[in-house]
Amino acid sequence: MSTLDASTIKKVVVACDAGMGSSVMLAGQLSSSLAPYSVKVQHSPVNQIPDDADLVLCQQGLVSRAKAVKPDKPVLGFTMFLGDPVFDKLQKAIRDGGQLEY
Amino acid sequence: MTRADEAPSPTSSGPTESTLSRLKTKVQRFGGNLAAMVMPNIGAFIAWGLITALFIPSGWWPNETLAKLVGPMITFLLPVLIGYTGGRLVHDQRGGVVGAVATVGVAVGSDVPMFLGAMIVGPLGGWLIKLFDTKIGHRTSSSFKMLVDNFSAGIIGGALAVLGMLGIGPVVRTLTEWLGSGVQFLVDSGLLPLASLIIEPAKVLFLNNAINHGVLGPLGAAEAAESGKAIQFLMETNPGPGLGILLACLLFGPRMMRASAPGAMIIHFFGGIHEIYFPYVLARPRLILAAIAGGAAGVLTFVVFEAGTTATPAPGSIIALMAVTPKGGHLGVLAGVAIATVVSFLVAAVLLGFGRAEKARELQEQVAAGGQVDGNAKQKG
């Protein structure tokens, strides 16, 4: 477990296998919940995570691939696509500017 | 019970697991690359599928002139798009150009659509021009850069096209025909439902795109070019098995699943984003049996009805499925989806003990956490 200062997060990238389905859906939901804190949310295929991502978000099953592509990026894994506590944790950390464990 | 399982071999289970997960990551990446060549071009596949469904002699509005679009699109446009995308994945625009030229070499003169060939020579072309650029091209002085860039891409692409037409093409064509007749054998002998034994577990390990767009899609397109529809398009995209599992989770699943299941069902069945049900299976791995049973029942139904679609329904939403089903085939497709849903639901319901097992487990977890049975359990910090 390492931590990340949530106030440094300016861009969150949601990654899925193709970058066309579930990541688009999640990015849409997250961008509206994170918009008040001027955090950008983008989606991408897990093989093509952009370099300017401050935090990568993907399903547990894809975490090792995301880490293989971007070994130096913090990767936060979630389990469920709907109502996973990780999303609340992320929003809370960004809102309060605390430390985010990943 | 888990404690007893783990205790005897704490050292041996570690490396095996990490080797397995490394393998999984590798397969995912390879499959992801296959799918990444096809998925950005799904729009073109659907355009072809719609044109086919509308204008061929057995279509909704048969039209001899417009039906002329069908052949060139599947023979040239779609393979070239795949080859271009494959090359571009390796080496951007220059890789894409060489990949596209190389693909024409395998596509021309082939009587089967050259998707497999495009998936080989596209990235190969991209890789060769990348090799040239990194080894030789970057040493060129800037005044000759444009000349060298254009002619290196032209010569490598042209050479690959010739090689593809004479050498790679015939080999891949034979391979494609073998694969095609292999699938046909499975259909004829009624063994096709067994494919669900591989498809459904691979799906929930996030190999869904690799299986569908990397393997079944190209096989199906070859079949659809011949007979106007293909069962291969339905095997992974059938939303029935996932819907059945979500339905069972809604009624009998643990509390956390019950809450999110209705939203997940809409996103899965109508939005076509199947990923949404994978975590439910991964959380209760035995549910994979429900997915396999449902998937196999669906495939069997498709075989019986001789159902198929004209293009890959992507995403696997019921709306997309209906849109690419040829005239007169809707009953078979709907029956397959419905039967898959029912079978998967019933098996999942049994596996979840109709909710009794989950209630007992919740109770057990609360007791184990040192909390009271009444729901006063302490929250884990």
Image: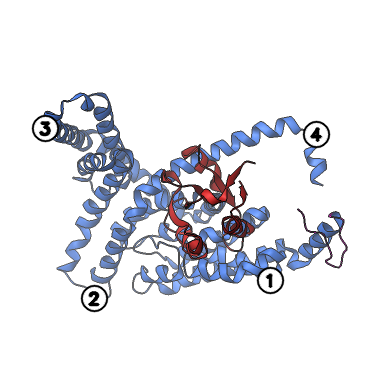
Chain colours: A red, B blue
Looking at the rendered structure, which numbered label has been put on residue B97?
none
Quadrant for residue B253, please give it: bottom right
Query: Which badge, 1 or 3, comes first in the chain's sequence?
Result: 3
Measured Cα–Cα span from mark 4 to mark 1: 37 Å
Q: What's the CA distance linking mark 3 and mark 4?
A: 68 Å
Residue B50 in the image: x percent, y percent? Answer: 29, 67
Going from N to C along the chain, the mark reached first, 4 or 1, is 4
Q: Is residue B273 above or below residue B85?
A: below
Nearer the observer, disc 4 or disc 2?
4
Residue located at (57% from left, 47% from top): A5
Disc 3 secondary structure class: helix
Asked whether B376 falls inside the magenta stretch, the response is yes
In the image, the segment drawn in magenta is B369-381
> Mark 3 and 4 residues: CB-CB less than 8 Å, in contact?
no
Residue B61's tag is 2
The chain holding disc 3 is B
Residue flagged by tag 4: what amino acid is it? Pro
User: On the image, numbered disc 3 is attached to which residue?
Assistant: B147
Instruction: Determine the chain carrying the residue at label 2.
Output: B
What amino acid is found at the position of numbered circle 1 in the picture? Leu
Q: Quadrant of residue B46?
A: bottom left
Name the residue that disc number 4 marks.
B8
